[in-house]
């Protein structure tokens, strides 16, 4: 302050922002002179202009003629910052809640449609690569295929067998509890056999692999993308689909039918154990009822679903891995997404297949 005028000197730029802010905070705004002098002001940028506006107030700067002392460019910059800080914050207009709800539904449906189109395109690209690779044994990636079979099949065998055994025991127990009121506990055998041969064997194995293996595929490919290994593969002129997706898809299509068969046998063994211990139905009678009443087509229907589910689970897991954006958080988000999508698609496809087979009488 000089002769009842507030004089500004030096460069008011970002490099001096901290010092300028401290100096401005020390001044008592209630006793500031009415006159301002900008003739000695050096360089000015938006950081310095914001300090000036906070010190003098946007209304004073916009109404004062002292800003005209500055060069045209600096004066316009100071006025622009003052107008920006003087404007009240924009408030979101309260729209029609029904219109907003419908717009949200439309946006979600559009997103789901794009995701399904992307999945269909990736599925077609994988099938085209399979058709190209399978007739050429030299291009088979046997090491990657065997490693994927070991990971998806052999390592998953204990948990699949244990889970289906326990579910088979529960189904037999609950079925017997209901059928006992009608004096038809013997049909517990048919209930366990039908449920595991047609539905539970393949469904439980597929859900377990969707949670266990699809997430692993997403995390593996996503980590490779974060580390820029996919870019290196493309730089070498190789196809990530052929190297990473095809071995995993084929391994899943081999592993899931085997796990489905193990799940069927394990589930029926759990039901047979409960029948023998609680219902006085010995194993020999259990097997004779199976042989007499259960047709082979029920086993084939359940086993025939396994390769389709395996292909879908592997495709979703690999696609989510390729969609990773390049951060650890993105890997986690797409890993969760792959599990949810895989389980949802498996259950949806199983429901459609059940309706189809029922209408066909199979």
Image (cartoon, rainbow, N blue to C red):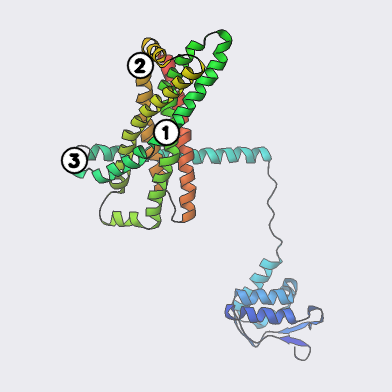
Depicted 63 relative to depicted 277: above or below: below
Q: Is residue 222 above or below residue 71?
A: above
Q: Residues within 10 Å of mark 2 (few under 14, many from 20)?
A: few
Which residue is the site of mark 1? 160
Q: Image quadrant of residue 40?
A: bottom right
Q: Which residue is mark 2?
A: 297
Nearest the viewer among 234 and 193 is 193
- Residue annotated with mark 3: 137
Q: Residue furthest top?
A: 183
Q: Earlier in the sequence, mark 2 or mark 1?
A: 1
Asked whether residue 114 is in view, the answer is: no
For the N terminus, which image quadrant?
bottom right
Q: Nearer the viewer, mark 3 or mark 1?
A: 1
**Can residue 133 be seen?**
yes
How far across and how far down the image is residue 27, in percent?
75, 82
Position of residue 152 measured from the top left corner of the image (x, y, whole percent): 36, 39
Residue at x 53%, y 16% (from the top left corner): 176
In depth, the one of 284 and 328 nearer the eye is: 284
Residue at image coords 30%, 44%: 147
């Amino acid at each position: 302050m000089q002769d009842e005028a507030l004089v500004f000197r030096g460069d008011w730029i970002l490099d001096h922002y901290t010092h300028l802010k401290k100096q401005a905070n020390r001044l008592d705004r209630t006793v500031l002179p009415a006159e301002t002098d900008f003739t000695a002001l050096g360089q000015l940028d938006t950081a310095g202009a914001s300090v000036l506006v906070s010190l003098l107030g946007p209304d004073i700067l916009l109404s004062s003629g002292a800003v005209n002392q500055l060069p045209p460019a600096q004066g316009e910059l100071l006025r622009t910052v003052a107008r920006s800080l003087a404007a009240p914050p924009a408030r979101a207009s309260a729209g029609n809640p029904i219109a907003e709800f419908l717009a949200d539904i439309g946006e979600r449906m559009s997103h789901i449609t794009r995701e399904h189109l992307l999945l269909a395109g990736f599925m077609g690209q994988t099938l085209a690569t399979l058709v190209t690779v399978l007739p050429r044994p030299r291009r088979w990636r046997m090491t990657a295929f065997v490693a994927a079979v070991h990971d998806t099949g052999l390592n998953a065998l204990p948990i699949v067998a244990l889970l289906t055994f326990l579910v088979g025991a529960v189904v037999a127990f609950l079925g017997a509890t209901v059928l006992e009121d009608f004096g038809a506990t013997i049909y517990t055998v048919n209930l366990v056999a039908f449920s595991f041969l047609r539905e539970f064997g393949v469904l439980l194995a597929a859900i377990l692999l969707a949670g266990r293996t699809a997430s692993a595929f997403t995390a593996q490919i996503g980590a490779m993308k974060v580390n820029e290994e996919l870019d290196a593969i493309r730089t070498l002129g190789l196809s990530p689909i052929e190297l990473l997706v095809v071995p995993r898809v084929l391994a899943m299509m081999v592993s899931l039918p085997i796990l489905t068969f193990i799940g069927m046998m394990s589930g029926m063994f759990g039901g047979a154990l409960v029948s023998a211990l609680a219902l006085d139905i010995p194993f020999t009678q259990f097997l004779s009822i199976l042989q007499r009443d259960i047709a082979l087509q029920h086993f084939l229907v359940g086993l025939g679903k396994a390769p389709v589910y395996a292909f879908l689970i592997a495709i979703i897991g690999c696609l989510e891995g390729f969609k990773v954006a390049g951060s650890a958080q993105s890997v986690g988000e797409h890993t969760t997404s792959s599990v949810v999508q895989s389980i949802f698609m498996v259950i949806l496809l199983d429901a459609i297949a059940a309706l189809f087979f029922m209408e066909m009488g199979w």
